[in-house]
Amino acid sequence: MTPFASASLRGLAVGAVCLTLLVAALLFGAAIGETRIPLETVARTVASHLRGGVHGIDPIDAGIVWNYRLSRAVVAAACGAALAVSGVVLQSLLRNPLADPYLLGISAGASYGAVSVAILGLGGGFLSLSVGALGGALLAFGFVVVLAFLSGRGPTAIILAGIAGSQLFNALTSFVVTKSATADEARGIMFWLLGNLSGVRWPDAWLAVPVALFGLTVCLLHSRALDAFAFGTHAAAALGIAVRRVQVVMIGTTALMTAVMVSLVGSIGFVGLVIPHAARLIVGVRHGILLPTAALVGAVFLIGADVLSRTIIAGQVLPIGVMTALFGAPAFALILVHRPAQTGGGR
């Protein structure tokens, strides 16, 4: 067997294992909840819907699985994958192990956009919370890009501009909530800001999944360029990488993925920060395998966090951002203690 054929077989085997793990996570996400539903019922429900009708299954169980839990698990998987891939890309481009998708101020901008729609009535009732969040996220990203460009300091400028943008839009959000929101409105906004999958349904999945797959594909097409960035931008340029073009495409792709996911589910921290480090511990630093591994781990992690958020307290659903922080913060502390980051800031 030739080395190329052997590598192809290994790639197919790894892909099959990853797909199996993801399908298993989705099935468990649809089965586990306050009301436990057997995996057989979940599988039969999915198969029946794919064939065009539900037969021989309790309609209540079928409705819970298909209309509530499975769509929620699919959106969680897409969101986890997108945030994890974005974290890998930003940590590589900026050569900063603490970089994550919310570094660009996108989360803060999305929060401001959602608050503007929900409390200030921006759009006159024609804009949804998600559309307002997406608009705010893109506004914040534009602010960060312009500020970084004017400073002209490369990756360091993006980090500093992201911090400034986050502080600005967080302050604007707090100002609007404090000045104009009622107690009920403030409670609803704060719950959404902590991450909320309760309202997602299949229309949200039809947006989240294509965006996540598109972002992963674009990043994989630039995997060799991302490998070169491990040695710095000057070394990457010397290897023939179009540094500026790659930076624009990669940061724009991560911004798009993060903006869409935040607009659907709110702010979910630590996924884009912790999962890339965990994936590197599993497969190393070559982006050709690191990116899909991070996507898989991020998807499974967020599905698991969502299941826990629905079951850890009987009769109550916790914001998923609380669960990711409870598990992500100790995990990141362990990674820092046992394996100090090998990449540093700078150009």
Image (cartoon, helix red, strand yellow):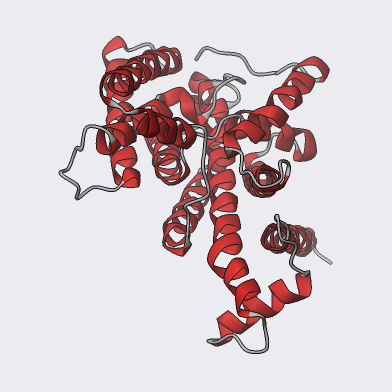
Is residue 109 visible in the rendered structure shown here? yes
The answer to whether residue 153 is left or right of residue 11 is left
Where is 186 relative to 342, above or below? Answer: below
The answer to whether residue 122 is left or right of residue 312 is left
Q: Nearer the viewer, residue 23 or 4?
A: 23
The percent position of residue 330, horizontal first and vertical second, equals 75, 23
Quadrant housing the N terminus? bottom right
Where is 127 relative to 107, above or below? Answer: below
Residue lying furthest left in this view? 124
Q: Image point 73% across, 42% down: which residue?
A: 312
Where is 183 relative to 225, above or below? Answer: above
How many labels, in total? 0
The percent position of residue 62, horizontal first and vertical second, equals 62, 75
Is residue 276 visible in the rendered structure shown here? no
The answer to whether residue 334 is left or right of residue 62 is right
Q: Nearer the viewer, residue 171 or 226?
A: 171
Q: Nearer the viewer, residue 334 or 53?
A: 53
Q: Image point 62% across, 31% down: which residue?
A: 322
Which corner quadrant of the image does residue 138 belong to? top left
The percent position of residue 265, horizontal first and vertical second, equals 47, 44
Q: Image point 32% across, 28% down: which residue?
A: 182
The answer to whether residue 256 is left or right of residue 62 is left
Q: Image point 19% across, 37% down: which residue?
A: 122
The percent position of residue 283, horizontal first and vertical second, equals 76, 40
